[in-house]
């Protein structure tokens, strides 16, 4: 997809919103005219005993009810339309760069003990998570964070996610609809505790309670009809009403406790029901998506059970009206019926509820991963290579967090060994490493990557790029980097494939110690099961290949036009032959000519 597609969707949605606003005005005007006309017809017809006017009043009452129902339906459609506009605006923000100001950046999921979270901009401002996130629920957000930090061992799951994301990419309008319906849920919505509770049936003699409710509700209704239409005594229905109300009040602490989970859930349950109906009728027939949606169909069909639970939640919510509470319980023992029905629902479908909610959380992850394919012209699904020896091959790879217009594509053809990258300041060395590392993270998550082609073997990603000292812990920048490289060496003893990315190795110490330490570290990290990439300004490290260490050199260049320094950000083979530090110092006025 491209920007023009989403601009067209937005324009069409704005036109629909304007049409709905006009229709809303007409409904309000019609209701305003019909209601007083109905009252006037009924009152005047009753005064003069005119059947025709009473019939007209009845017709106007029916018309008013129809107008109210259609107005309510229109209001629901207007809310969905607003959600559509918000979702399409979110897609357009990915093209404009405004996505970097979105509030949901996943910073809370970053961990200090996981350096790639910060080094590869996985979480936080201007991060992969912030760009991707289409999740509204807490469970969906946590699943997305887990996908972006998963180890690359379960390739079967990764391939299933790739297949499901690919199917979503073929239906961009469906993606917008699903995101719009999800966007109507409360921000950070979490129903996992409710799902756990629903899985356990209510305790107690609910059959007896149900029988009491049925017997005395029917007794009141029959006695009321007898008194109203057959001139029976009113004493019996009045006594039954007071008895029923007394029973309801006696059970009130229990009904309040048992029905509490549904008391404020009517709206959310209704929204979930519409989400599940959308998923059920969606043209997603692939095997991978079938596995994702399977819990919606077995053992209990989600939409049917959800509809019954929504109706129950609305009935429970009506209890908050004091007048309704007394009338409904006095006449029908409303609370007892709600509790008995809720118990029956939990026995029949409660255990499946958690599975339905997990389906939507997983769909939110898939919608998030599909965002790359919707908003990046250059993208591809990565190929996972077989074999124990690490490999990484990319053509036209770019970072996700930089717009395509500003990014420079680069290639990579890496196998076991070390690549030492030299080059001037700001020439693109760190960006190149982050591009490969972040695309590897996306690949293992099951997402498309920003490249023309991308193939790699499963590798654990270790980084040492963005390092800071810890004053409270008494750890200097140099020592913090030592700790990271020590972890790399410790993991390397397992013999598992690794992708190691080290930026400006040992920059926190003096040049003499830095070169000695870097040479030793590179020797230790140049392994038959690791791809190691090291950037440096120390040209001495480029000579390690002459000493029998499998090291290759690459570099980035700059050129000058007048008093300007320019970069093409393209990686080239061999070591760098130029520096620009003194030039930059002169430009900053620190050094004289």
Image (tube, rainbow, N blue to C red):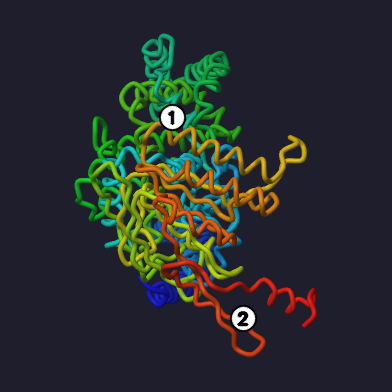
> What x and y, as percent, mark residue 403?
49, 70
Q: Give the alpha-carbon distance from disc 1 to disc 2, as whole Å.
A: 60 Å
Give the labeled residue for mark 1.
195
Tell me if mark 1 has few (under 14), some (14-19) or many (20+) residues whose alpha carbon lies within 10 angstroms of its own.
some
Residue 91 point in image, percent of width and height: 46, 66
Image quarter of the N terminus: bottom left
Residue 75 appears in the picture as rendered: no
Q: Is residue 274 above or below residue 564?
A: above
Q: Position of residue 166 (x, y in %)?
A: 28, 57
Q: Quadrant of residue 370?
A: bottom left
Q: Is residue 449 visible?
A: yes
* Rendered residue at 41%/68% (across/down): 573
Question: For the residue labelled by badge 1, is the local secondary structure a helix, a strand or a loop?
Answer: helix
Placement of 188 over or under 537, stated as above or below:
above
- In percent of the image, x 41 and y 72: which residue is there? 6
- Residue denoted by label 2: 565
| 378 lies above or below 254 | below
Q: Secondary structure at mark 2?
A: strand
């Amino acid at each position: 997809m491209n920007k023009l597609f989403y601009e067209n969707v937005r324009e069409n949605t704005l036109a629909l919103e304007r049409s709905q606003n006009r229709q809303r005005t007409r409904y309000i005007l019609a209701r305003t005219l019909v209601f007083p006309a109905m009252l006037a017809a009924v009152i005047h017809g009753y005064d003069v005993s005119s059947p025709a006017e009473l019939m007209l009043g009845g017709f106007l009452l029916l018309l008013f009810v129809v107008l109210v129902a259609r107005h309510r339906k229109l209001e629901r459609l207007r809310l969905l339309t607003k959600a559509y506009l918000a979702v399409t605006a979110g897609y357009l923000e990915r093209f404009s760069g405004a996505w970097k100001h979105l509030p949901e950046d996943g910073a809370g999921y970053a961990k200090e003990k996981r350096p790639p979270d910060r080094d590869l901009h996985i979480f936080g401002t201007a991060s992969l998570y912030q760009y991707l996130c289409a999740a509204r629920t807490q469970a969906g957000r946590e699943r997305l964070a887990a996908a972006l930090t998963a180890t690359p061992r379960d390739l079967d799951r990764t391939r299933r996610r790739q297949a499901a994301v690919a199917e979503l990419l073929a239906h961009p309008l469906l993606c917008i609809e699903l995101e719009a319906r999800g966007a109507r849920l409360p921000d950070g919505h979490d129903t996992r505790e409710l799902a756990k509770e629903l899985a356990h049936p209510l305790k107690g003699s609910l059959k007896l309670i149900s029988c009491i409710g049925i017997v005395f509700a029917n007794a009141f209704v029959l006695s009321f009809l007898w008194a109203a239409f057959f001139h029976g005594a009113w004493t019996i229905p009045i006594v039954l009403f007071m008895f029923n109300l007394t029973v309801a009040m006696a059970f009130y602490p229990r009904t309040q406790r048992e029905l509490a989970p549904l008391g404020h859930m009517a709206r959310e349950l209704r929204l979930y029901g519409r989400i599940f109906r959308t998923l059920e009728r969606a043209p997603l027939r692939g095997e991978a998506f079938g596995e994702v949606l399977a819990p919606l169909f077995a053992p209990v069909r989600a939409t049917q059970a959800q509809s019954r639970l929504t109706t129950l939640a609305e009935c429970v919510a009506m209890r908050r009206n004091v007048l309704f509470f007394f009338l409904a319980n006095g006449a029908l023992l409303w609370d007892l019926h709600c509790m008995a029905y809720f118990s029956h629902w939990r026995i029949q479908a409660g255990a499946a509820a958690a599975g339905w909610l997990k389906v939507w959380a997983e769909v939110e992850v898939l919608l998030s991963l599909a965002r790359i394919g919707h908003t990046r012209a250059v993208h591809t699904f990565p190929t996972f290579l077989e074999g124990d020896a690490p490999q990484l091959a990319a053509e036209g790879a770019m970072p996700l967090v930089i717009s395509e217009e500003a990014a420079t594509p680069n290639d990579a053809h890496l196998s076991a060994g070390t690549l030492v990258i030299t080059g001037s300041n700001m020439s693109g060395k760190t960006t190149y490493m982050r591009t490969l590392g972040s695309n590897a993270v996306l690949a293992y998550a099951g997402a498309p990557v920003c490249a023309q082609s991308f193939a790699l073997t499963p590798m654990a990603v270790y980084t040492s790029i963005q390092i800071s000292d810890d004053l409270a812990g008494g750890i200097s920048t140099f020592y913090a980097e030592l700790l990271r490289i020590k972890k790399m060496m410790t993991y390397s003893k397992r013999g598992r494939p690794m992708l190691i990315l080290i930026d400006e190795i040992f920059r926190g110490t003096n040049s003499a110690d830095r070169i000695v330490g870097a040479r030793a570290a590179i020797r230790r990290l140049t392994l038959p099961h690791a791809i190691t990439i090291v950037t440096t300004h120390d040209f001495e490290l480029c000579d390690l290949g002459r000493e029998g260490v499998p090291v290759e050199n690459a570099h980035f260049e700059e050129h000058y036009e007048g008093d300007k320094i320019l970069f093409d950000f393209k990686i080239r083979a061999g070591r760098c032959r130029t520096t620009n530090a003194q030039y930059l110092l002169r430009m900053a006025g620190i050094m004289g000519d």
